Amino acid sequence: MWNRLVAKGKIVWISGPAIRADGMSSTKMYETVEVGESKLIGEVIRLTGDVAFIQVYESTSGLRPGEPVVGTGQPLSVLLGPGIIGKIYDGIQRPLEEIAQKSGSFIGRGIITTPVDLKKKYRFRPSVKNGEQVNPGSVLGTVEETPLLTHSILVPPYHSGGKITEIVSEGDYDIEHQIAITEKSGNKAGLKMYHKWPVRKPRPYAERYDPSVPLITGQRVIDTYFPIAKGGTGAIPGGFGTGKTVTLHQIAKWADSKVVVYIGCGERGNEMTEVLVEFPHLIDPRSGRPLMERTVLVANTSNMPVAAREASIYTGVTIAEYYRDMGYDVVLVADSTSRWAEALREMSGRLEEMPAEEGYPSYLASRLAEFYERAGRVRPLGSADRTGSVTLIGAVSPSGADFTEPVTTHTIRFIKTFWALDTRLAYSRHYPSINWMQSYSGYLEDVSKWWKQNVSAEWYDLRAESYNILQREDTLKEIVRLLGPEALPEEEKLVLEVARMIKIGILQQNSFDKIDTYCGPEKQLKLVKLMVKFFKEAQKALKQGSSLADVRSMPVITSIIKAKFEIPDDQIVKLEEIDRQMIKEFSQTIAGEQEQEVKAVA
């Protein structure tokens, strides 16, 4: 894709991870270079005449002016092929396990590794025959990458296509083996099981679809109230201790996607260690297999080189797009984009660029836009039968939970689902601490058709009615603060009571409870329906003379609230028993009230 004209220069200036080298007139923007005698990996980020500014992805301690800088002729790229799934990479796709074997507890400098095992053999099953025409994105064959994932071997997007002149028969091959040869206009080209792709360049696709299919996460506050679509974008901002990481773990574990890409971008080492230790032991809930058999982890902690942190986002999203092109739904979780923006800020400061708001570079917004624009549900190149998606969910860590700071405000411009984590809810042990008044989803109308066709036509109305109760309760809280609850009429006290039931019985969810950790769409709908029905029946009871005290004392309230813990997804018919119990208790309450009225008249 790039020419092979190699630039050779020497270091003239060093400032942390940024260096300046002269004699680089033949280099290109975003070309990778080998820096110093240790051959550290770097990337050209600015060119002025024959002087190149380079960000180095490894520690620059010990570098000195005069050491050589040699261009590679290639942009920063990732290797895409079998063997990626289940790996734990650093920000530039170096496997951490191999680095640990070579350098021990701390990452050494100048370590050269391959992203996947080039000698491992896979069972290749060809999908094309000699003489067939192939195009960019066509499937040459498949290998079983893990028991959970069949890996399609694709013709690279930059390939010109042509007729297959040779294709290997079914058998075991390593990924360096040439599996096919194509010919077009007399030019022959060999194809292997892998290819490379520049991380900063979005992979092309044939057609982009509207995001109309919801990503079911099993988290009620997300799926029912603030849904995200497959191929959509979401942000989850929150202050320290609000449960961002646990919420992201839940999404990664339970979302109905085929592949998960988890980027730990600039997080604390101990938090990332928890992820690295926990994920390999998690079990995929649908298959019973280890979750790592469909997961890729990109780990770049806050004490690792800051330039690699900036690259980790692009590494992760390029891997996600690759599996999207096979026709899979991919969820990419970035924790957190604030740390990535801080890496941008540090590099910008080293380059002595003019700072914008709060010291961030003026191009912060455009970089965020470039990242979130790579989400989407698409028809990949090469076949009309495949549909894949990349859903991007970025955590934001604003200092002091201030949502007006630049990273959060710019992120809001480019995403359609906003899950605002609330410090007060977290401190009161309400998890997930998503504030239902500040959060929103731009996909409600888009996904309502799916809910109507696959779950129930009532979903949209029930969601609106239950959310209206929460909104009314939010308004009434001000009056209660000023005048006390006694100042409210009975019907408005009922609103407060039912809102409390919704908050405990639906919005709260225990990720460590065996039953409550995941709640399917049917169960979510029935729980909301129970709450709305209880509210309507209670209103009727109050109009027919029952007191709010009688309604509050009904045993069925406890059954409704505890249903999320006690009734698994495969036993949701039991919710109908609670429904019948509720109708029976309301009838008894109204009958008892009428009986007392008759006695009083007598």
Image (cartoon, helix red, strand yellow):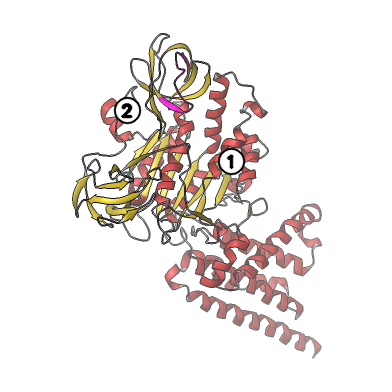
Q: In this view, does 598 lie to the left or right of 39?
A: right
Q: Which residue is drawn at 59% across and 68% down?
A: 528
Q: Quadrant of residue 72?
A: top left
Count up the numbered dots: 2
Name of the residue lying farthest toward the bottom? 602
Which label belongs to residue 105? 2
> What's under tag 1, amino acid-wise?
Ala
Residue 191 is situated, as x and y percent measured from the top left of the image, at 29, 44
Q: Is residue 352 above or below residue 174?
A: above
Residue 154 visible, this angle = no
First in sequence, mark 1 or 2: give its number.
Answer: 2
Foreground residue, 482 or 207? 207
- For the stretch drawn in magenta, what is the main secondary structure? loop
- Viewer-closest of 487 and 389: 389
* Residue 486 in the image, given as x and y percentages of width and height: 78, 62
Which residue extends farthest top?
66
Instruction: From the image, tell me which residue sits under label 1.
Output: 369
- Does the stretch in magenta take in 374? no
Q: Can residue 413 be seen in this view?
A: yes
For the view shown, which residue lies furthest in the front direction? Answer: 185
Q: How crowded is mark 2: few (under 14 residues within 10 Å), some or many (20 or more)?
A: few
What residue lies at 29% left-to-right and 34% top-to-bottom? 114
Residue type at tag 2: Ser
Start and end of the magenta stretch? 20-32
Q: Does the magenta stretch include residue 23?
A: yes
Q: Position of residue 9 (x, y in %)?
A: 41, 14
> Is 310 rendered above or below residue 253?
above
